[in-house]
Image (spheres, grey):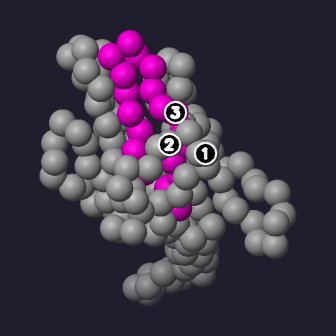
Amino acid sequence: MTEREQPGFTLVELLVVLTIIALAMAAVPAIVAGLPSIRLRTAADDMVATLRELHQQAIRRGQTTELILDPSARAYRMSTDATPHRLPEIVAELGFATTAMMPSGGNTSIRFFADGSATGGTVLLKNGKRQAAIKVDWLTGRVRRDECFETRPSGAPQHEVCHQ
């Protein structure tokens, strides 16, 4: 006697599909949670590129160039271009980790000199518990995105979450 095939799915097929869906749902929050870190790192990389370009222009032209940061407006402008550039929305706060940056009319600036040196300092781009650090070496004018940290409340040490 032959069995008639009935249309539909077997129990094994249904379990396989449900397992795949469960794995996909578990992966989505991890991907979405990583997006702010990636966007903050991208904003830091853009700032690094701008600073490096100013450094190169100072050496090529033989004159001082400057990046003027306006923390209250979350914007910056360059001495070579008076147009202000707003930081991306992911950057909620602009901070400074050194006094080597010289005030310029209430704003903060980083200067690059014709000999390749700079005023130096560290710019911090912050978003909630995340921050990206951009360091400018005073002697060589070298610019690098050094590290990203996730800050901890109540003075606890910071935990490194990304590298250069």
- Is residue 52 depicted above or below 7 in this figure? above
Q: Quadrant of the C terminus?
A: top right
**Residue drawn 59% across and 45% down?**
99
Image spot of residue 135 (x, y percent): 54, 37
State if disc 3 and disc 1 touch (CB < 8 Å): yes
Indicate the amino acid at tag 1: Thr
Residue 23 appears in view: no
**Residue drawn 60% across and 81% down?**
11
Magenta highlight range: 108-126
* C-alpha separation, residue under disc 3 versus residue under disc 2: 6 Å
The residue carrying mark 1 is 98
The residue carrying mark 2 is 101
- Is residue 45 depicted above or below 92 in this figure? above
The residue carrying mark 3 is 120
Category of crowding for the residue at label 1, using alpha-carbon neighbours closer than 10 angstroms: few (below 14), some (14–19), many (at least 20): few
**Image quadrant in which you'd find residue 84:** bottom left
State if disc 2 and disc 1 touch (CB < 8 Å): yes
Q: Mark 3 vs mark 2: which is more N-terminal?
A: 2
